[in-house]
Structure formats: structure tokens, C-alpha cells
Image (cartoon, rainbow, N blue to C red):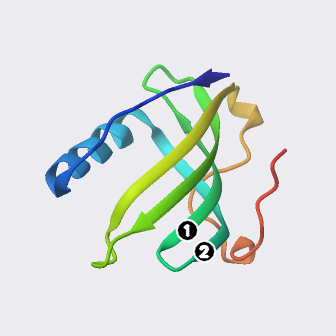
């Protein structure tokens, strides 16, 4: 398992766009499954898993808990995330492509 500790504040739309572009460039075949844990006012807590592969072909399953807070303008003003990446072999994959309609609204298993 690898854990990335990142303490960086990304400010402004241009910097956010560039950050996401670089992130998506590193995480190929990104397929997420997100579950809403809780929400109140302008705060949301989500749990999600995703699988992706690096440019070297190594697959990872990532487990994540995130807290999001929006401003008066409804744009995200704060995001806190804890993400653990676990290397997997391609036959171990269980997430691919967009979430099928039959799975929407159902919690995605942790196993």
C-alpha cells in the first residue's frame, strides 16, 4: 500500500484546472465508485473507491474518504481527503467504466 501525504493549497480556477489535468494524466483508465455518507448545509462527506493504472501499467485500487465544503457561491472552497492506494494485478480489478444504472444509489462494497 502506498499513502501520499500532500499538504498543498490549490487556489483559483486556473490552478485547480491544472492540478486536475496533471492528476488525470497520471491516473489512466480512472473508474470511480462514490457513496454519499452525509451532508448538512454546505458540507458533504463521501466515501469512494476507484481503480486506475499508472503509465508503467501498474493497477491500483484506491480507497478514499473526503470532506467537501462549499462557499456562498456553491463552489468548493475546501476539500480534505484521505486516500490509500493498493497495488493490484489486472485480474483483481472489479471496477471499470461508468457505474451501471443498476448499481446507482447502491453502496459499493469495500472488499
The residue tagged with tag 2: helix, strand or loop?
strand
Q: In the shown orientation, is residue 1 left or right of residue 110?
A: left
**Residue placed most toward the observer, 92 or 10:** 10
In the image, is 33 to the left or to the right of 106?
left
20 relative to 103 in the view: left or right: left
State how far apart marks 1 and 2 are (Cα): 4 Å
Reading the image, the residue beneath label 2 is 39
- In front of the other: 23 or 12: 12
| Placement of the C terminus among the 4 image quadrants | top right
Q: Is residue 70 above or below residue 3?
A: below
- Badge 1 crowding class, 10 Å Cα cut-off, few under 14, some 14 to 19, many 20 or more, is some
Is residue 85 positioned above or below 15 on the image?
A: above
Name the residue at 36% across, 39% down. Answer: 23
Which of the labelled discs sits on residue 84, or is there none? Answer: none
Judged from the image, the secondary structure of the residue bearing numbered disc 1 is strand
Query: Quick one: 36 or 104, which is closer to the camera?
Result: 36
Instruction: Identify the residue at image location x=25%, y=50%.
Output: 16
- Residue at 76% across, 60% down: 108
Horizontal and vertical percent position of residue 3:
58, 25
Q: Are marks 1 and 2 in contact (CB under 8 Å)?
A: yes
Q: List x then y, in percent, for residue 76.
A: 36, 65
What residue would you read off at disc 1?
44
Amino acid at each position: 500500500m502506498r499513502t501520499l501525504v500532500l499538504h498543498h493549497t490549490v487556489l483559483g480556477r486556473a490552478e485547480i484546472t491544472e492540478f486536475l489535468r496533471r492528476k488525470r494524466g497520471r491516473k489512466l483508465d480512472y473508474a470511480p465508485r462514490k457513496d454519499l455518507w452525509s451532508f448538512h448545509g454546505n458540507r458533504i462527506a463521501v466515501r469512494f473507491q476507484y481503480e486506475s493504472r499508472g503509465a508503467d501499467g501498474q493497477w491500483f485500487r484506491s480507497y478514499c474518504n473526503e470532506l467537501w465544503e462549499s462557499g456562498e457561491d456553491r463552489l468548493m472552497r475546501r476539500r480534505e481527503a484521505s486516500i490509500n492506494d493498493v497495488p493490484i494485478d489486472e485480474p483483481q480489478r472489479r471496477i471499470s467504466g461508468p457505474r451501471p444504472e443498476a448499481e446507482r444509489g447502491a453502496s459499493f462494497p469495500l472488499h
